Amino acid sequence: MRLSNTITTITGGGSDGWDLFIKARKMISEGHNITELTIGEHDIKTDTRILEAMHAAALGGATGYAMVPGIDDLRNAVATRLTARTGVPTTLDNVLITAGGQAALFAAFRAALDEGDTALYINPYYATYPGTIRSVGGVPKAVTAEADNGFLPTFEALDAAAAGAKALLINSPNNPTGAVYGRDTLKAIAAVAIKHDLIVISDEVYDTQVWEGEHISIRSLEGMAERTFVVGSMSKSHAMTGSRVGWLVGPDEAMGHVLNLLTNTNYGVAGFTQCAALFALGLGEAFESEIGAPFQRRRALAQKALEGQNAIRLSQPSGAMYLMLDIRATGLSGDDFADRLLMERHIAVMPGESFGDAAAGHVRIAMTIPDAPFEAAIKEIAAFAANLA
């Protein structure tokens, strides 16, 4: 079969970054007892009240074709939420419901890029970012955020890379680093976007998981609402990863065109899951804080467990559900460290190299198992690193 260049080059001709994860899952399937710290999947399941709302909606008839833009009540709820949190007036005309945040990301890039257009993204990055850009025919171009600068991008680095680019993808709170972009960082990003007339795609799916500072949407900065798409999701904020309910927010004149894309791709999101998402948003900020609390607690456990040792340095995470550990003192790459840790200690973590060369010599830890085994795993990782250093 003669396939398109676009589909056969999504990974750029190399690994998509998931090799270690796949290896760990294979070992689990073979009966090995693996401590799984790779993927951002909550250890708590979707709240039973949300599932009951989903069940009731399905029994009530919400099983047919849903409106492609999303049900109006949910779009209004998302708009109200964003208006309250960002101060940017938002209506349902600015909101489209998508099959998770990844579908929103794809739609945003499909809207922003023509074949051959360049899109900037920050390195380290979530594993699907460059592949999503390639999947719409774009050319991904990484901009390094240095570990020594807290993995925050700078105006100078962005400005140097931006000539000829069409779009810029940012992610705060950040996966994989846990960095939260403060106002000064966002102002620098906005200045570059305005100077080079870039469309900004802001992945804000971790907006409820901020442990230091505050979440600021770049859409709220002067001159940015008209050039920004925001990606959101119920996955992280409400532990609804499998329900696949996300949204894309942008200027209303752009959203009509994006709607045409959604009509010709997913043709809407299941109505009963949208009803469940509407119910979940109605649980308010206290519920979202409850979902995020374990990660803030485990962050503190890790900080304490890593005190007083020199083999690992914790890149202090200000948000999200991950830790980045600098293991360069061991003399190993992130790939080699993660592979040996899996084979020798049966602990699965993601190599920093899975997220770009800016994270080389690091590993990413997902804080997604209960507190006691999580704390034990961190101590075991520290002991393993100390034996290597």
Image (tube, helix red, strand yellow):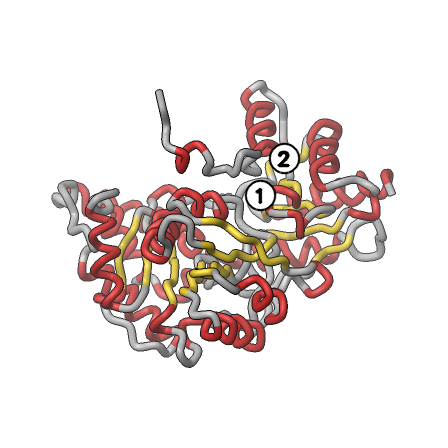
Specify the label residue 35 is tagged with. Answer: 2
Residue 329 visible here: yes
Q: Which amino acid does label 2 sit on?
A: Thr
Percent position of residue 44, x then y: 47, 45
Q: Does the CB distance between marks 1 and 2 fall below 8 Å? A: yes
Residue hosting label 1 = 369
Q: Quadrant of the N terminus?
A: top left
Image position of 112 with respect to 196: above or below: above
Q: Is residue 317 left or right of residue 260?
A: right
At horizontal 27% and vertical 54% (from top left) the residue drawn is 97
Mark 1 is on which residue type?
Ile
Q: In this view, does 315 lie to the left or right of 13?
A: right
Question: Could you tell whether 116 is left or right of 362 in the image?
Answer: left
Instruction: State which quadrant residue 266 falls in.
Output: top left
**Could you tell me which secondary element the residue under label 1 belongs to?**
loop
- The residue at the point 53 percent across, 44 percent down is 127
Residue 182 position, x and y percent, is 56, 73
Residue nearest the viewer, comparing 246 with 369: 246
Q: Distance between the residues labelled 1 and 2?
A: 8 Å
Image position of 82 with respect to 293: above or below: below
- Which of the two discs, 1 and 2, labels the residue nearer the N terminus? 2
How many residues crowd mark 1 within 10 Å: few (<14), some (14–19), many (20+)? many
